[in-house]
Amino acid sequence: MLAAVGLEDDYPALDEPARIALLTRLIEERRPLIPADTGGFSASTQETVATFRLLRDLRAGEHADALQSYIISGTSGPVDLLEVLLLMKECGVLLRIVPLFESGETLAAAADTMRTLLELPCYRSALAGVGDEQEIMVGYSDSNKDVGYVASGWAVYRAQIELADLMREHGVRWTFFHGRGGAVGRGGGPSNVAILAQPPGTVGGRLKVTEQGEVLAGKYSVTEIAHRELELTASAALMRGAGPGDARLSADRAVRFTPVIEGMAGVSARAYRDLVYGDPDFVAFFHAVTPVDEISRLRLGSRPAKRKQTDRIEDFRAIPWVFSWTQARIVLPAWYGLGTALTAAREDHGIDLLREMDADWPFFAALLSNAEMALSKADLDIARRYASLCADAGIRERIWCKIEAEFERTRDELLAITGGERLLDREPVLQRSIERRNPAVDPLSFIQLELLRRRRAGQGGDELGRASFLAINGISGGLRNTG
């Protein structure tokens, strides 16, 4: 757009300060940049302008309140929000601009991003136009895929504290929008537990959460269950916002606990990234031992399985990533790296401190209990059979041995903290539920294994393909919160 009107021929080449200065000036100027006839623009630019003009028209209609927020996926810095604000100004529409911080790096920089924006008069003016309330979305799925379970959870927790402090400093109200999925690897788990585990001083009676996928049927398809779920969610939000909250987490405990989780996040992220991004054969192993290619053809999600047509883990969307590991009964995104982190923390700080953190810090307790549930749904014996689908023995043994060792380490460390003999001994109802479902799911896993072998050998055609899809659906239904 800028090139077409002769303002800047190479906008992508500008560094961030130059882009911010240019965008700020254009937002504050009254002169329009986009002509009524956009025929001189490229097809993609015309489509973008048409989208913003459509939003303007819908906001002028009788259902204006149905459109309130414009979410920017993959927000990396202030420029992402200013570009949207400029397009809104040009097209005559104003919505809440919601950054989605969803990787380890962008969560860490989230407060700096918002500080830069809040210090710009043009952005504060736009914020005033939507009630002086900033909505911020935090993503669990991509941050988990980026840095692993522990580091992701801590990054989201820490980012909210820093952002809430910043908003208070600037006199701006805020709402955190939690982009959670059904599986533990995508921020899933019991909603009330997740809400009560939020950082103190970050909820304040305002909370927004996504509910999606199989979670909708599981929570809301039966009236009585839906009523109970809404009661649990509302009561947790009220307690987190106005109740005692983290009264058990005294200032002294917070000072002692924070360095422990900081260290755990670093250790777990290194262990996770060493496996997922550091091993050059991991992608081949992933495709061989999970039904990810079959899931990609199933069209389970609302978007393609990959952002780009590559085999890089970075380009996989979170749904097929998590769903595939669950299907193979490994459930890797929900626990890998936790065992190594707990071992290091126990050696450095002692088991008594970890038990105290579990008893007195809702965030840490939820982190451990959700991983414990995920480990209970995994099955190492069946998972080992999926690992056998990797034909290269060297790759298979090297990677599978790491996964198996970390699984056993995580299980042992969790039991040492909880004092149980088996996983979920503290939650016998959930324990019995999983034990009753697994015998029905296990045969489907064996059937799926055989179907995968035959399909990959070129046998069966469409009939075998449909059978594979049915097996995927059955395993998903039996394991529940699968992704």
Image (spheres, rainbow, N blue to C red):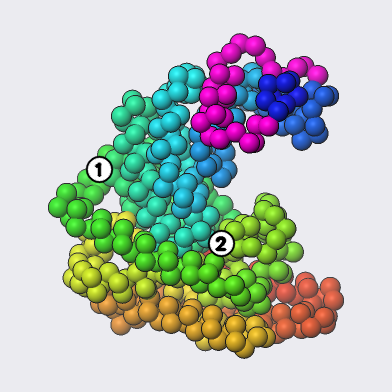
Q: In the rendered image, which quarter contains the C terminus?
A: bottom right
Tell me where residue 466 sits by quadrant: bottom right
Nearer to us in this view, 467 or 86? 86
* Number of other residues with Cα within 10 Å of mark 1, as a class: few under 14, some 14 to 19, many 20 or more: few
Query: Which residue in the structure is indicated by mark 1?
Result: 243
Query: Which residue in the structure is indicated by mark 2?
Result: 483
Amino acid type, label 1: Gly
Boundaries of the magenta span: 10-37
Amino acid type, label 2: Gly
- Describe residue 76's horizontal placement relative to residue 45 as left or right: left
Q: Residue at x 33, y 53 (%)?
A: 197
Q: Residue at x 45, y 37 (%)?
A: 113
Question: Is residue 441 positioned above or below 28 on the image?
Answer: below
Tell me where residue 240 sits by quadrant: top left
SS of the residue under disc 1: loop
* Number of other residues with Cα within 10 Å of mark 2, as a class: few under 14, some 14 to 19, many 20 or more: many
Observer able to see residue 385: no
Question: Is residue 480 positioned above or below 35 on the image?
Answer: below
Q: Is residue 243 magenta?
A: no
Number of numbered discs: 2
Nearer to us in this view, 207 or 107? 107
Which of the two labelled residues, at mark 2 and mark 1, occupies the earlier sequence position? 1
Question: Is residue 326 positioned above or below 265 on the image?
Answer: below
Tag 2 near tag 1, CB within 8 Å: no
